[in-house]
Image (tube, rainbow, N blue to C red):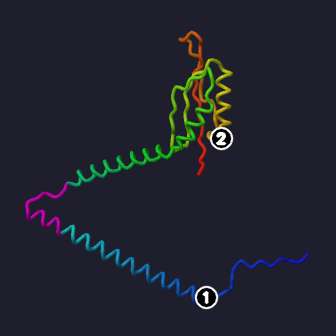
Amino acid sequence: MRALHLDFASSRKPSLLGLAMFTLGLIVLMTVWQRHTHINQQLLTLDQSILQLKERKGLKPAEPQLQAKSSADLLAKIEEAKKLASFLMIPWGDVLNALESSALDGLALLAIEPDAKKRQLKITAEAKNKDIMFSYLEKLEASGELANVYLLKHEVVEDVDQHPIRFVAVATWKDHQ
């Protein structure tokens, strides 16, 4: 068997075109940086001018606390908008189809709680007996729209005559993009 000779360090000199592109990139970068610095300087000058004009007219400059409060409000609104956007991105059609196709006699769906970050759905339901409960969980898993279905907790409801089983299951919805 022949010995292998591996040369990971290339001894090639950089091409002239590569060096020219690198130099051009550096020139563009420096030009953009200078322009950015110049625009920032202009903004500072304009801010100073606005403050001087407000002082001449007798207007009070905005207080930093009010600006901080409005920034906090803005951040809170942005967070709320992100939550709403993630809630709207849930594949509701697929999730509801899976729940409908898995419906059984003797089972009542009480609540569904989506968690968009985890892509999970918490399902609260009541079943007449444990066989119906397990059949429902198996049908959810086999639906093709939900995966990793598991029973989180269950309890027998003693207050009701038929003693149904109230349970909470968790499932992850699949992305079909």
Q: Amino acid at mark 2?
A: Gly
Question: Could you say where residue 149 lies in the image, as x and y percent from the top left?
Answer: 63, 35
The percent coordinates of residue 105 (x first, y second) are 62, 22
Most common secondary structure along the magenta stretch: helix
Q: In percent of the image, x 31 and y 48: which residue is there?
A: 73
Sequence-first tag of 1 and 2: 1
Q: Is residue 152 magenta?
A: no
At x 21%, y 67%, the residue is 47
Determine which of the numbered discs, if any, sits on residue 144 in the image: 2
Q: Secondary structure at mark 2?
A: loop
- State the residue in front, 6 or 109: 109
Q: Secondary structure at mark 1?
A: loop
**Distance from Cα at disc 1 to Cα at disc 2:** 54 Å
Q: Quadrant of the N terminus?
A: bottom right
Reply above or below: 117 against 46. Answer: above
In this figure, which residue is indicated by the disc labeled 1?
15
Magenta run includes residue 60: yes
Along the horizontal axis of the image, is 82 left or right of 164? left
Q: Nearer the viewer, mark 1 or mark 2?
A: 2
The residue that appears at 68% across and 85% down in the rendered structure is 11
- Residues rendered magenta in the picture: 49-62
**How far across and how far down the image is residue 101, in percent?**
62, 33
Left or right: 30, with 164 as reference point: left
Q: Residue furthest top?
A: 161
State which quadrant residue 141 falls in. Answer: top right
Residue 27, percent from left and from top: 44, 83
